[in-house]
Image (cartoon, rainbow, N blue to C red):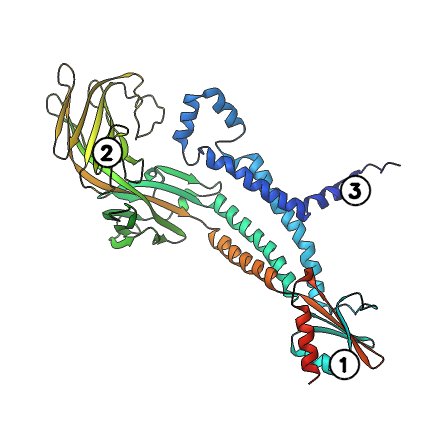
């Protein structure tokens, strides 16, 4: 005989029970972790729009299919949001009934002893006094229930509390992460030493705003990078310390205050923090045309490619006719071998050199399509020169006639500042601390019950250890030893 089909309320009740089961909550938690993986494998529009555009340029068809599945916007996709919301509902639906049930159990007295104690753990019959046993149990923090047949005692009920609080803390963590995602912001900006960063959207190189973040709520502050010092271990070449000296003010017109920023010592503006995230170098160059007129002058940030700060960058000069672009590499401590060619052997400025490849043609800066300031599209350009420069040297490019001259004037460091506003971070942190603490409690607290019956002038004693954790026998022996004194 087949079971009747579920319809109406019965079907809804069945689906609700499935969703709010602990097993399915764990499955959803696993799915959330798996769903986060594409966000770390593929560039996201909110963080790297230029890299996403490169995908569409290199392989348009594949990129279109990836975009249909929201692989460039994983954390804002419908399927990621669905998993997140279902996990949230599942945890709440699972924990609320358990919380109510636990509250009633915590306030109630232990259940009476079973009729047959011989089948329980650590059973033994001894001579003794029931009143003395009751006093000992109370002194050792047992909750007791006493009736005409004997005593039922319970200890360490907080183990179940730890288990319950752990799952409630998970909800707090999810709320904190969700609040930071929709109400927070995260941005990055490269600031060359000597330049000033003002906290407005146009100052950022990358800016990711939460769905409900209001730009008007961005804190007003300005940071001038006055000096940057990096110390490295001469043998291992590993960084020992990064120190940024900054002039900080809460408004453009306010007098600046000198402050020190290190990797683990950010600046704080309300609930926003400014972190020192990375560093590199900006070569100082001057580009002149064939008549000697200056067409470009100033620092150009280069992006590091390895731990020794071998860097690449682009110098664009749209004011020259025809336009000129320099595809460049910078080496703080120049070295060379047959395999790698030019590279940097140490991250500090011991022997700085600038390698420039000169291209002539259309830089495509007037096409209206955003492009990286660190790269040049040379598909419609011709190379007219290649040279390496030390500080103070110049190179005249052009063949057969001189088109212009580039001079390598020096180097200044730059720092990458990361501005983060995480309104849910305190909640996520508090939830994490509570979750770890309660998990430790649920793992190490030993919950046990002891039953005592008076029968024929003797005492029958037995116990029950939750999950068969050790220690019950020793506690019963301790009780009998102290009661018999």
Query: Where does the N terminus fall, quadrant-wise?
Result: top right
Give me the C-alpha separation between circle 2 and circle 1. 87 Å
Nearest the viewer among 479 and 263 is 479
* Residue named by callout 1: 130
SS at mark 2 in the image: strand
Can residue 9 be seen here? yes
The disc, 2 or 1, on the residue closer to the chain's N-terminal end is 1
- Residue 81 place in picture, x, y as percent: 57, 39
SS at mark 1 in the image: helix
State whether residue 359 is above or below residue 114.
Answer: above
* Residue named by callout 3: 10
Residue at coordinates 43% horizontally, 25% vertically from top-left?
Answer: 55
Residue at coordinates 75% horizontally, 82% vertically from top-left?
Answer: 131
> Is 72 left, or right, of 347 in this rendering?
right
Q: Which mark is residue 330?
A: 2
Q: Nearer the viewer, mark 3 or mark 1?
A: 1
Residue at coordinates 48% horizontally, 24% vertically from top-left?
Answer: 63
- Residue 345 place in picture, x, y as percent: 24, 38
At label 3, counting other C-alpha atoms closer than 10 Å, the crowd grade (few under 14, some 14-19, many 20 or more) is few
């Amino acid at each position: 005989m087949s079971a009747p089909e579920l319809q109406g309320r019965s079907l809804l009740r069945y689906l609700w029970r499935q969703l709010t089961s602990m097993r399915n909550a764990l499955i959803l938690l696993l799915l959330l972790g798996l769903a986060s993986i594409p966000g770390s494998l593929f560039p996201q529009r909110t963080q790297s729009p230029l890299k996403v555009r490169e995908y569409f340029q290199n392989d348009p068809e594949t990129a279109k299919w990836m975009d249909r599945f929201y692989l460039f916007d994983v954390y804002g996709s419908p399927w990621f949001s669905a998993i997140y919301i279902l996990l949230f509902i599942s945890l709440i639906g699972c924990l609320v009934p358990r919380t109510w049930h636990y509250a009633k159990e915590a306030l109630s007295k232990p259940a009476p002893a079973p009729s047959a104690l011989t089948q329980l753990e650590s059973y033994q019959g001894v001579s003794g006094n029931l009143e003395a046993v009751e006093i000992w149990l109370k002194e050792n923090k047992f909750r007791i229930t006493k009736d005409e047949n004997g005593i039922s005692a319970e200890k360490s009920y907080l183990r179940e509390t730890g288990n319950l609080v752990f799952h409630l803390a998970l909800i707090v963590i999810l709320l904190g992460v969700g609040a930071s995602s929709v109400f927070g912001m995260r941005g990055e900006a490269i600031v060359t030493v000597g330049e000033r960063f003002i906290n407005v959207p146009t100052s950022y190189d990358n800016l990711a705003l939460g769905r409900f973040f209001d730009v008007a709520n961005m804190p007003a502050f300005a940071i001038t990078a006055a000096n940057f010092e990096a110390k490295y271990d001469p043998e291992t070449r590993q960084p020992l310390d990064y120190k940024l000296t900054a002039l900080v003010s809460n408004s453009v017109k306010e007098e600046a205050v000198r402050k020190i920023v290190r990797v683990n010592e950010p600046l704080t503006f309300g609930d926003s923090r400014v972190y020192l995230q990375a560093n590199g170098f900006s070569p100082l160059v001057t580009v002149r045309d064939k008549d000697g007129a200056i067409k470009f002058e100033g620092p150009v940030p280069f992006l590091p490619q390895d731990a020794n700060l071998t860097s690449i960058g682009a110098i664009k000069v749209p004011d020259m006719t025809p336009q000129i672009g320099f595809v460049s590499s910078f080496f703080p401590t120049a070295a060379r071998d047959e395999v790698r060619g030019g590279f940097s052997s140490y991250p500090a400025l011991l022997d700085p050199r600038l390698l420039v490849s000169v291209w002539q043609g259309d830089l495509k800066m007037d096409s209206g399509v955003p492009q990286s300031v660190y790269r040049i599209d040379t598909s419609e350009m011709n190379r007219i020169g290649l040279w390496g420069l030390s500080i103070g040297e110049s190179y005249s490019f052009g063949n057969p006639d001189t088109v212009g001259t580039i001079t390598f004037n020096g180097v200044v460091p730059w720092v990458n500042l990361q501005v983060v506003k995480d309104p849910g971070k305190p909640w996520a942190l508090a939830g994490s601390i509570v979750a770890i603490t309660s998990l430790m409690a649920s793992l190490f607290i030993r919950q046990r019950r002891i039953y005592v019956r008076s029968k024929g002038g003797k005492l029958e004693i037995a116990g029950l250890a939750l999950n068969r954790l050790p220690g019950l026998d020793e506690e019963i022996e301790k009780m009998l030893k102290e009661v018999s004194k």
